[in-house]
Amino acid sequence: MKVYPVDPPVPAPRLATVRPGADEAAALEQTWSDPPGLLGWLASINHKSIGRRFIVTAFGFFVAGGLLAALMRLQLARPQNTLIGPDFYNQLFTMHGTTMMFLFAVPVMQAVSVYLVPLMLGTRSIAFPRLNAYAYWVYLLGGLMLYIAFLLNTGADAGWFAYPPLSGPEYSPGKRVDFWAQMITFTELSALVEAIVLITTVFKLRAPGMTLNRIPLFVWAMLVTAFMVLFAMPSVMLASTALILDRLVGTHFYNPAENGDALLWQHLFWFFGHPEVYLIFVPGLGFISAIIPTFARRPIFGYSAMVLSLIATAFLAFGLWVHHMFATNLPELGKSFFTAVSMMIAIPTAVQIFCWIATLATGRLNFKTPLLFVLAFFFILLMGGLTGIMLASVPLDLQLHDTYFVVAHLHYVLIGGAVFPLFGVIYYWFPKFTGRLMSERLGRWNFWLFFIGFNVAFFPMHWLGLKGMPRRVYTYPADQGWDAMNLVATLGAVTIAISVLLFIINVWRSVRHGAPAGDNPWGASTLEWATTSPPPAANFVQLPVVHGREPLWEAWPNPRFVTGLALNQREMLTTTVLDALPDHRVVFPVPTLWPFVGAVATTVLFVGSIFTPWAVVWGSIPVAAALTAWFWPKRNETRGHLALEKQP
Amino acid sequence: MTSLLTHAIAPALLLQAASAAAAQRTQDALIAAGPQAAHIIDLWRLTLAICTIVFVAVFAAFAIAVRRAPPSGPQTPPDMRSANVPEPTLAWRVRAAVAVSAVLLLVLIIASVLTDRALARLPLDDALHIELTAHQWWWEARYDDPDPSRLFTTANELHLPVGRPVVITLRSDDVIHSFWVPSLAGKKDLIPGRTSTLQLRADKAGEFRGQCAEFCGLQHAWMALPVTVEPADAYAAWADRQRSNATEPTDDDARRGKAVFLGSTCPMCHAIQGTDATARRAPDLTHIGSRPMLAAGALANGRKQLAEWIADPQRFKPGVNMPSHALAADDLAALATYLERLK
């Protein structure tokens, strides 16, 4: 076994073989805990507190978006229904799409990784913990802004894709679309910040010995996702900024009457929008790769192929945005190239599906609720992937585009590829989050109702689309043969709602009365299961050293632990990017209110700018003040750091 | 209670009755009435067959894997053999499955490109040229002719001759719309500032329905386009009628209706050829009485519906750009009579 070289003149850290004592655990707990009280809660920067809030908030938006969908299904239950008028309906479907894409699906993936990635990497904290807290507050406040506007009848109503000129100043007067465009600003800020935080964490804070080809596939998926965010989000930022400038200060980026171009938006939006689908789907792949080995009792088959598939998916995802624009007047030959890329992206997914089947086939299966949710993926996502191949073909797309077929397809992909695995994730890591197991009985009811309700709700929509029903209509005529399938779809939606209610009940009861979980209730192999449930504030009393891909399933030779890091300071060990050799020590920041204050100041600036351009000028002063205070060095902290340098 | 019930339900019933009165028109991507839609259906069948086979094969592999695998629990010691020993059989199977997938995808790509080519090669000799402009939320169709005096304009309907190719030039007056008559061809967007064209041919006579397929605002749902495909002579007769000016009223009631039309706000937006009303903000009404539907599919056509629509369009199509008109009851009736007779 390789012994990790430690530069002798630097006395710490050391890779040791002994466990630290109980007094060390207590000291660590004190150093890494969040401060008490309400102010302490607002000042919290521990990645687990932020991650928990992030997950709960994103799930709150999921429920809100789901209720909007339920209202839509009630309206569509019968033809020419007068329950909901077009104005409210258009707000409903815009808010539903916006909530699910921007406020639920992407943030919840980042939320889960904020909690889990540092634990899986065997480190004490996420990188840039204050920035991480700031990202959460910005996300929360941006989401609240959108919903407060919605409750004041200023809900966005131009679709989650907001095509100009419909979303432009002439055809969407008022503030509705401004709130939508500004929500993009909030989400992209939060997502970009989280991407930087996660990439830095994965690259620099891994446990010694966790080389790049040993990091869990879940972490690989999150890393790939974070890089995709870095490249996709600037495109939508450009698009939404140009839109809000068109609307607020009279530029003409998208106004064809002034030499602008209505299609420019579609290129920019889908250059982001298609990778966005993979921002949601790639973490789902990571979830599955984390859950299957545990319940199949063997390592994943084809680790390298899986990693390369994830990366290939990320690259290809940027090359197929035009398949959302086949019905526009782009050159026909060019469209065929996008057909080819759109179909090619099925190959890396196929590689992963076959590797999972190989893993399942040679494993021994422990059929618990998390595995059920993951196995549903094989039915639902397979179907969604195959309808995706249909939509990739230019001629077929010309018939299916903007019909209910696409509604069916996208829900099969996103719910099958992300939401089912996500429910699996909650059942799987709930014991780690809370120290208690969720009820298996309720879990099975939750799963089967969701699975059946989902298929009842969305399968008929394929047929509806082929039968000519377009999307985004608030009602439809009675004589087209669409009535029965719409009613069935509504019944399916009600079943899903009941299932989600059971899930909430299960979480509610299990937090209080669930069976105690222990450290590793599923017998899993990754490092987060090596610590207590829930983990202590510092994650690990003793930081582990890693010797293989499945640390808890393999022999654990010496050296086993990192010691020598300060207990009274938030001292961390960074490691090298490729080989995770100990690199150097850094002292991490302590909790502070400034990220919260900074996020509030940012919110004031963003929301104010909807009403007056002067908000950008005056609003930047409190933002600058908050950021300055955030980074202002404190004398006692500096003294502590210096002391550490002299007496490690 | 009863009156409440009547008030709440009557409009809904009325709408139901209005739509039931309309003949059922085909709006179905799987029922082709021309070569373009038929090519796509052929591709659809091939794609569906391949995808079904793949689905069944992969799901069967998955189901067999899951059924065959022995049970375990959290205490079952993990099988770590694969960490040190390669699994060549498994690797070979996975590679074979990926290779087969890639080949099938290639087949689908080729089929898609060939279909695309077939769609682009529709013979266009002696084509009928139509310029279709989309508005929030109605369609304006101008039938082109080399002889400018034979041009004519209609709204919210298309008539096409059987067997003759049609080139439709697509424009938008406001936001992005999409032209889609699934039984005839795939859809094509109408984008402001850009002009696109669509070629199609209808080979079967019949009544079809198209609908705007790109979300275009409040009344996206009621932006339908009835399409009548008829034999060449019936089409020629219809076109000739469209070229003529509006029918002059023959009785007092209709004459009064015309006076109401010209004396109120109607001519500020609508045109009736042969009268002083020439505005183009809203559908041309020269032959409105001959059209199958009113308000882009929101109501069946008829005297009663015309009167109700004019009195309160927002009731049937909330958000429509046409304002309500508080006309005296007999004026309204006369106006409806006049319009109904504009065959």
Image (cartoon, rainbow, N blue to C red):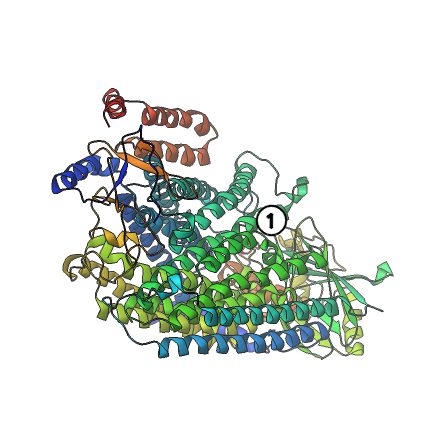
Query: Is disc 1 placed on a helix, strand or loop?
Result: helix
* Residue A263 location (% of width, % of height): 63, 49
- Residue wearing tag 1: A267
Q: Is residue A288 visible?
A: yes
In this view, the residue farthest toward the right is B147
In this view, the residue farthest toward the left is A23
* Residue A454 location (% of width, % of height): 39, 70
Asked whether, in this view, residue A292 is left or right of residue A389, the answer is left
- The image shows a total of numbered marks equal to 1
Residue B37 lies in quadrant: bottom right
Chain identity of mark 1: A
In this view, A477 is above or below A613: below
Q: Is residue B185 visible?
A: no
* Residue B295 location (% of width, % of height): 59, 63
In this view, A485 is above or below A115: below
Asked whether, in this view, residue A442 is left or right of residue B49, the answer is left
The quarter of the picture where the C terminus of chain A appears is top left
Nearer to us in this view, A287 or B252? A287
Asked whether, in this view, residue B32 is left or right of residue B126, the answer is left
Nearer to us in this view, A274 or A165? A274
Residue A343 lies in quadrant: bottom right
The type of residue carrying mark 1 is His
* Residue A325 location (% of width, % of height): 61, 56
10 Å crowding of disc 1: few (<14), some (14-19), many (20+): some
In this view, A604 is above or below A83: above
